[in-house]
Amino acid sequence: MYIEQIYTKCLAEASYYIESNGEAAVIDPLRETQPYLDLAEERGAKIKYVFETHFHADFVSGHIDLARTSNAKIVFGPLANTSYQIYNAKDGEQFDLGSIQIVAMHTPGHTKESTVWLLKDENGRDHCIFTGDTLFIGDVGRPDLSQKDGTMTSEDMAAMLYDSLRTKIMPLADEVMVYPAHGAGSACGKSMSKETFATLGHQKIHNYALQDISKEQFVKELTTGILPAPQYFAKNATLNKSGYDPIEEVLQRGTKGLSPEEVRNFIKEGALLLDVRKPDDFALGHAKGSLFIGLDGSFAVWVGTLIENLNQGIIVLAPEGREKEATKRLARVGYDNCLGYVDGGLAALVDADFEIGNVSEVSAKELEMQMEASDLSIVDVRKPGEYDSCSITGAQHYALDFIHNQEEVINAETDTFVHCAGGYRSMIAISILKKRGYDKLVNVKGGMSAIKQTTIPLSEMACSM
């Protein structure tokens, strides 16, 4: 028996490759399928099943492409309805894989179709569970993502999850391993651990959701303090139900080099120029009107949060050699309409007389010195919880997550200093605000991490420690 967790930090997502006696299965695969095909080939195995724990909302699964290229069977649990061919497992149904078995455990609560897959080893012992978004390390899945039909409330779903955990998962032995679909950083839960697996016994002690609490307490805990889901979640879930273009076609379209004239014409037709370089590079020079979301950060999550049209035509301005990576990571969250990349990068646009802008930047120490001399306009673009726990005294809060749906707080007539935790999100926010016509924006390099090293007044004494 062989199990490999394939963890993708950008999405905080875990997929799994399982193998026994030359037969393999993949659970919750990413959009790009080649790594799973390569692994099976290297190990001399044939992929027999693609198991899905539920309809994912935070990424587009590669189950359709992987089944097509490997001739594997796509298996969902009960209640999953799709526009393509799948096999719906019955609760308790067993699937043979070499000399091991995979057993379906229907665990509704995160979504109605959510199913945990239990692996029994060669001796028939319960070895591990692949829990999807039903059970994380330190947390459980949010209950508010599948209520669009209006038949169930978040409270209803949370109550179902309470029952699923206690009737299906908690009776399993403490030594059973828990392999979830996500770790810390995912918006599918509230307080996931940075660990990506643990024993069930460990979780029975340390996971709040598995403690001896009433259903009412559980429901209240689970439904309190949930931030609204990013706008792309519902759209990705729909793609996972209805299907999508083959990944090979998406990558072929998106990796076409475009001349400055082609870029100019696409922009006139409504295309978005997406700058995926480093924040410092964007600050030094960028095409005016471009949106910055750097590859070296939570790229896919911010693309899905901030680019509201899933079919938006996108032109990528990428570091040389990373154009295909950008296209692939766009496709992971369903942005398949990448038209190509700027051949020659920013230099080509400069030579073609594109309007070029820049972003003023200061260090936290420079900000401190300027604050001593006069009152400054400071905007904090972190999440509400980050701002509430520690912020610069007098700073305005303007969370990047909701930047499209909140009133402007920026004074266009004076310099505004923008910061986040480290400098990545603040540069994204500045690029959006510049597109809206705000020019007097200054990025605080190093964000709150650097600010804490100064004597800048903070709202809570504890956050300066």
Image (cartoon, grey):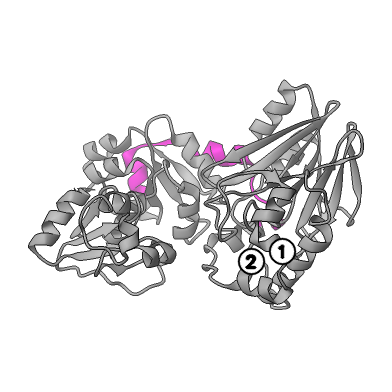
Quarter of the C terminus within the rendering: bottom left
Is residue 280 in the magenta section? no
Q: Which residues are magenta?
A: 239-266
The quarter of the displayed image where residue 161 is located: bottom right
Q: Is 295 located above or below residue 20 in the figure?
A: below
Q: Residue at x 30, y 63 (%)?
A: 461
Where disc 1 sits, the SS reads loop
| Mark 2 crowd level (few <14, some 14–19, many ≥20, 10 Å Cα) | many
Residue holding disc 2: 145
What number of labels is visible?
2
Task: Name the spot of residue 325 as percent of width and height, x first.
Answer: 49, 36
Q: Residue at x 73, y 73 (%)?
A: 215
Query: For this rendering, which residue is in front, 113 or 316?
Result: 113
Q: Is 251 located above or below residue 222 in the figure?
A: above
Any part of residue 360 in sight? no
Q: Main secondary structure of the magenta part?
A: helix
Where disc 2 sits, the SS reads loop
Task: Name the spot of residue 242 as percent of width and height, x first.
Answer: 70, 57
Residue holding disc 1: 111
Whether label 1 touches label 2, CB < 8 Å: yes
